[in-house]
Amino acid sequence: MIAFTGGGTAGHVYPGLAVAEELKIRGHLHFLWVGAQGGMEESLVKTWGMDFLGLPAGKLRRYFSFKNFLDLFKITAGFIKALWVLSRTRPVLLFSKGGFVSVPPVWAAKILGIPVFSQESDLDPGLATKLNMGKSTRIYTAYDKTMEYFPLHLQTRIKALGNPVRRELLQGKGTQARETWKIPPNSLLVLVLGGSQGAKQINSLVTQALPQFKDKIFWVHQTGPEALHPQESAYYHPRIFLKQELPDLMAGADLIISRAGAGALWEASALGKALLLVPLGEGSRGDQLRNAALFENRGAAVIWKESTGQVGFENLLRDLLDHPEKRDQLSREISRFGAGTAAKRLADEVVEFLSIPESPHV
């Protein structure tokens, strides 16, 4: 049995599920996901068909908060439960996708002698990855440059293989999206993705822009749980969360407006989609800004700068919609990241490791 851990956002779940899909094809049929009690990852994992066990989970903050003291107890309780779960289930390997919930299982696995594979999606490692890296048997990054963030004594454990993308996302049909959503033949499909939790900033930019972009634009907008003022209309379709519809919509999209989380970037890369990015900036650790800058510098995305405000957003949007050659150029450049192979390569790494007689998984 192979165990997975990670959670908090879909970006800490879907890449792990993509690797599990590839392992299933290779004959590994027994999986367990260790996540947070009541976390959003539970429904995603169970929908996929994997067993799920929840831990008490405390948030890892980089700033002072009285909540840190309460969360220390949650983290300790999570570690004790992780020890109990892993000692009873004895997985041959723990695959960590990061997020604060991954730290107790990774540390427990190290104590129990269970090998750990950690995968980091962002350009610079998150706090959980930094806490887990010394406990990891192997570390996989999306970018070669990410290796610079790890200490020298860990360099031999690291490989850059890209970010895993789910097979189902690669199998979408744009023609099916146009038929299902009744998109007029001469309309451009603009897909707005604020991440699994939505994004108030994107929501505000898009809803204010709607009156300026009614003609020949068909909007599908993943809003998250935030209540929006614009009502659904013939050309604007808000949804709290897109699941089964997403592969077809992404395949058919002429332009995607998105946050700059690693998952969103690499999913767009796998499908060769033009991106207008609204990265999370203020109040974050800056990972999305650095992710976005990397793609922009390679000509693979356009970034909205907060300093340009609503007018700047609408100007960028109008420029991309009015010039298909610019969208085509973005599509060509983003495709060069080669995102479609990462899940297969990571699954190969797992299979290869577990086949080595002297590996400490027996």
Image: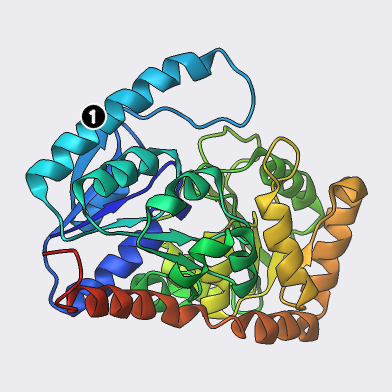
Using residue 187 as the reference point, say whether residue 107 is left or right of it: left
Using residue 25 as the reference point, say whether residue 226 is left or right of it: right
Helix, strand, or loop for circle 1?
A: helix
The answer to which of 241 and 265 lies nearer the viewer is 265
Q: Is 158 rendered above or below residue 315?
A: below
Q: Quadrant of the N terminus?
A: bottom left
Tell me where residue 230 sits by quadrant: top right
Mark 1: amino acid:
Ile
Point 38% across, 41% down: residue: 103
Point 29% across, 43% down: residue: 105
Task: Name the residue that disc number 1 marks.
Answer: 80
Of all residues, the one furthest to the left in this rendering is 88
Q: Residues within 10 Å of mark 1 (few under 14, many from 20)?
A: some
Percent position of residue 262, x then y: 56, 60
Percent position of residue 56, x then y: 30, 27
Using residue 358 as the reference point, say whether residue 271 is left or right of it: right
Of all residues, the one furthest to the front in this rendering is 153
> Is residue 234 in view from this perspective?
no
